[in-house]
Amino acid sequence: MLDREQIGVKSQRLALPPATLADLAAGLFLMMLAVTAAALLDVLYEPYRDARVHGSQTHYQLDDAVLYWAEFGRAADLNVKTAATSVSVELDGIHPAQPWMEREVFWSGRTVDEGTIDIRFPPALSVQAVRLFVVDGDSFMRVSLLQSGDQVRFANSHHDGVWHDFPVTVGERKAGRKSILLKKLVGDDARISALVLTGPGGDT
Amino acid sequence: MTRSLSLIFAIAVMAGLSQVWLVEAPWHHIYSDIDGYMNRAFKLAFGEPLQPLDTFIPMGLPAFYAIFFWMFDDTGFQVVAVLQILMMAGVHVLVGLTSHRLFGDRRMALTAAVLSLAYWPLTGQLSFYMAEPVCTFLVVAGQYCFVRFVDERGLLWVAGAGLLFGLAATMKTQGWVFTIATLLTLVFWPAARSRLVMWLPVFLLAAMLPLAVQSGQIRSATGADAWFVLPGNGSYNMYNGQSARRGVGTWDNGNFYIYFTSNAYFDDGLLPPIVFNASMLDNTFFEEQLGALWRQDPVRQVLRMGVSASELFALQPQWPLRNVEVYSRLEIFFKYLALPVVYLPCFLLLWLSLKSRQLPPQLVYIALPVLGIMAVAALTSGQPRYLNPFLPNLMILAAAGWATLLRSQQRTESRRQV
């Protein structure tokens, strides 16, 4: 076997001096410190990621005085739970959707682009507001527009369901009519689960 | 040195050409906001008036593309691709020249240039049309001009530095970081201070010139009264990044616009998209929304800023290289390789500076933009591609780190021999 000196290799030149090794180790330590700090930030931020809520939808039950309550796509296009006399709802472009799994409000009506809800009611009924329950039960990428005249609402982050209020204006009350546009902005479709008319004398 | 840098330039051009051949049709990968840049470029090229919303993004890149679309029509795409290749090859050469000017060490300069050449994410980005390749060239060229100015004085060098930094800021707002870093040399770099003080008006005028042209463009499109206006995406981008949503949209008088977040962490826990009844150009509205985020949960926002800054260095395929499978695999490999080869010597340099309690101002000048982009990422978002124009500086720092280690080893060696 050849001696290292014989083949011209000076082992002391190849080996890093302890001081250099110590410097390298210190550099490595600083780099690991930075990597650890970044990882720690990531861990601390974890609770804020993916705020999808799989909680209950108990807020689907309303305490307001309800004149009319219908659910979209539960048993038919429009499944009426509570109805005051002479209220009618017509849907254009909104059809029953596939039910969402493991959600309390599993039903909805959907439109792939836009649809309208046309509500007619007698002026004497004094309807105060139309409320729409919007749920995003199968996706995390859905934003819908709800619009009635200059009343504009956006259904953002509605995995747990949200009631959107549309006050009935004096003109609409006199005309006995209110129309609401449902339009998909982001996602596969726009969905709506329930419609309620509130006003004096309704069921509470 | 010249021969080595020429070789580096030739290899870089070949590397660039080879991957354009691989991708075949880079414009197939134009999407998201880059699509918007192209639309604006065509408008500028063919004299179509700009609309207010066109001024949402910086106008430098559309203006740059417009020149070639105007001159060559659709062939302009290929001309831009070739120019990008030449620019990136130029970046590697300029990294070597800047390093040599700053530290006077030939070996260190060549190491920096080779590191820059070998780091695939810099070459890989050439297959795509985006602001980063052009911006990288402008800031590296501007930095070289400034370093040369510190060495030799001269109107051309200082005006060149200012103009190139100003142009970079019209390509990507992050380009401002280099102008600010250069102005800060007045504080920490005596050699630069003694020269820049005299020439400061020239530097500032040159840096502001491209921004003034951009401001004029924005004013004519929006009818803004203010004498100096910037692109409208400032507050929107801050809200977009700090809210960490999959997208932020606006419903503006019946028109719907949305930008989806295309970060490396795209599928990793971003909040659902949100839409506002506002204009994307309404800075006051987005400032209010940002204020509301901070009032609601300041701890979340502080953490979000830290996470955004660290995401610049994410070990994930970055947009848009992840579109090409072989590139994304290469990119991940190089990002891991960068840990011991690029980042370790940077930290080593930091350690040696702390140990010796000496921080050469040249190093500070090169390090400041990297810290600057981290601050910008913290305020907005940390898409890894945002780091690209700042990577050449990291290569200079890495080469300086290895060279300092080598010198310290040689010193120890010679002491031992004595």
Image: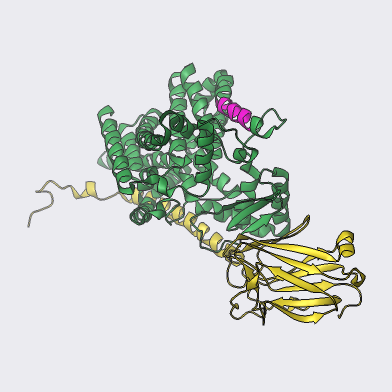
Q: Which residues are magenta?
A: B207-218
Quadrant of residue A94 within the rendered picture: bottom right
Chain letter, yellow in picture: A
The percent position of residue B278, horizontal first and vertical second, equals 71, 49
Chain letter, green in picture: B
Magenta span includes A31: no
Dividing the image into 4 quarters, which one contains the C terminus of chain B?
A: top left
Could you say which is closer to the camera, residue A149 or residue A105?
A149
Magenta part mainly helix, strand or loop?
Answer: helix
> Would you say B148 lies left or right of A185 here?
left
Q: Residue at x 29, y 32 (%)?
A: B5
The percent position of residue B87, horizontal first and vertical second, equals 38, 34
Could you say which is closer to the camera, residue B58 or residue B365?
B58
| B324 up-or-down from B48: above or below | below
Dividing the image into 4 quarters, which one contains the N terminus of chain B?
A: top left
Residue B178 visible in the snapshot: no
Could you say which is closer to the camera, residue B271 or residue B47?
B47
The percent position of residue A162, horizontal first and vertical second, equals 72, 69
